[in-house]
């Protein structure tokens, strides 16, 4: 791989310690965050355009409406007294008294009570706006989901969900280090134009009949060959003592660089909780169960995964897509 290819891996892979790396997810990470941010920025631009085209200061009407609702919700007497004083001046004027001599201004308490519905309505609007605001903030800074982790010391590839459940794939001592899972270089990828894809990893959880799908790699991907580079990096990490790509990745995923779209979709993401303690307990138990299996049982499991991989490769071949890992020339 070229030096730039190694640098680009930093967007998708990070170090989690001496013997573990993490591959970030794609669809449920950068894509959702980027999609929401694009919609919000688009709405802001459209709103600014319409206001300025009508000679109005951008969002001045919306801001004024919010301020008024806040006043009605939390300091209604300021507005009610102002209105009451205005009406009092009219009622006490000579002209009004001559025209309506029997009409008396109602007491302030009765007058203010007529605005109770307006006050409740404003409080509801403020509550709804606050709820919507926090939802927008959450989506704008959408949490970075836990990615696929590769532990070369325990020789396990695993994923921890938000609910702290685990999916674990075993790495064979010899042969293809990816034999314990299924990969698909042409995974789900929004707006890829048929040229760019996410890297799909399928992990078969014990007791399940079908593997679970995970779409990995940074979104948007920096190059069409990026999925191959991730797979080559994982293979190297599991077979070499000090693979070259480790020199170019850090403890955090890269966000800033030569790709503004990657920065836009991935900067300022909220962290997602990862339980290291529980992970070690679950991995140790899984490893203990694995070691209790006979060699035939282990090979049978790898054969099952190989069957899934052949099925995926065959399906992609029918679409004229080559799922073999391609090494750079």
Image: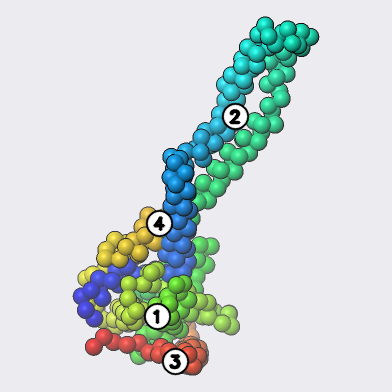
> Residue tagged by mark 3?
320
Quarter the N terminus occupies: bottom left
In space, the residues marked 1 and 4 are separated at their CA atoms by 27 Å
In space, the residues marked 2 and 1 are separated at their CA atoms by 55 Å
First along the sequence among labels 2 and 1: 2
Residue 154 rendering spot, x and y as whole percentages: 37, 76
Query: Please, is residue 169 above or below residue 55 in the view?
Result: below
First along the sequence among labels 2 and 3: 2
Question: In what element is the residue under mark 3?
Answer: loop
Quarter the C terminus occupies: bottom left
Q: Specify the quadrant of the image occupied by residue 237.
A: bottom left
Question: In what element is the residue under mark 4?
Answer: loop
> Residue tagged by mark 4?
269
> Residue tagged by mark 1?
195
Residue 144 rendering spot, x and y as whole percentages: 43, 61
- Position of 237 compared to 298: left or right? left
First along the sequence among labels 4 and 2: 2
Query: Please, is residue 198 above or below residue 178 in the view?
Result: above
Q: Nearer the viewer, residue 101 or 173?
A: 101
Give me the residue at 71% from left, 23% from top: 113
- What's the mark number on residue 72? 2
First along the sequence among labels 1 and 3: 1
- Classed neighbour count for the residue bearing mark 1: other residues with Cα under 10 Å, few (<14), some (14–19), many (≥20): few
Dot in front, 1 or 4: 1
């Amino acid at each position: 791989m070229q030096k730039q290819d190694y640098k680009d891996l930093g967007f998708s892979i990070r170090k989690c310690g001496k013997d573990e790396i993490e591959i970030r997810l794609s669809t449920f990470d950068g894509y959702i965050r980027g999609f929401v941010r694009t919609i919000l920025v688009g709405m802001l631009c459209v709103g600014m355009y319409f206001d300025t085209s009508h000679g109005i200061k951008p969002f001045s009407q919306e801001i004024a409406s919010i301020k008024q609702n806040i006043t009605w919700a939390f300091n209604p007497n300021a507005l009610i007294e102002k209105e009451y004083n205005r009406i009092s001046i009219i009622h006490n004027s000579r002209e009004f008294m001559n025209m309506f001599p029997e009409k008396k201004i109602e007491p302030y308490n009765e007058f203010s009570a007529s605005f109770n519905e307006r006050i409740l309505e404003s409080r509801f609007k403020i509550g709804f706006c606050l709820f919507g605001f926090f939802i927008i903030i959450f989506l704008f800074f959408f949490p970075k989901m836990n990615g696929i982790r590769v532990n070369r010391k325990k020789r396990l590839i695993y994923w921890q969900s938000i609910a702290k459940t685990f999916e674990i794939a075993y790495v064979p001592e010899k042969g293809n280090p990816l034999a314990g899972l299924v990969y698909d270089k042409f995974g789900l990828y929004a707006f890829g134009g048929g040229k760019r894809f996410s890297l799909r990893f399928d992990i078969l959880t014990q007791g399940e009949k079908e593997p679970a799908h995970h779409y990995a790699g940074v979104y948007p991907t920096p190059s069409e060959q990026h999925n191959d580079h991730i797979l080559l990096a994982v293979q190297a990490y599991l077979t070499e003592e000090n693979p070259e790509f480790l020199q170019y990745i850090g403890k955090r995923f890269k966000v800033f660089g030569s790709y503004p779209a990657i920065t836009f979709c991935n900067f300022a993401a909220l962290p997602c909780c990862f339980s290291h303690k529980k992970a070690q307990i679950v991995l140790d138990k899984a490893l203990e169960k694995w070691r209790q299996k006979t060699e035939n049982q282990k090979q049978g499991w790898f054969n099952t995964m190989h069957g899934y991989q052949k099925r995926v490769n065959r399906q992609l071949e029918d679409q004229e897509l080559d799922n073999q890992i391609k090494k750079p020339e």
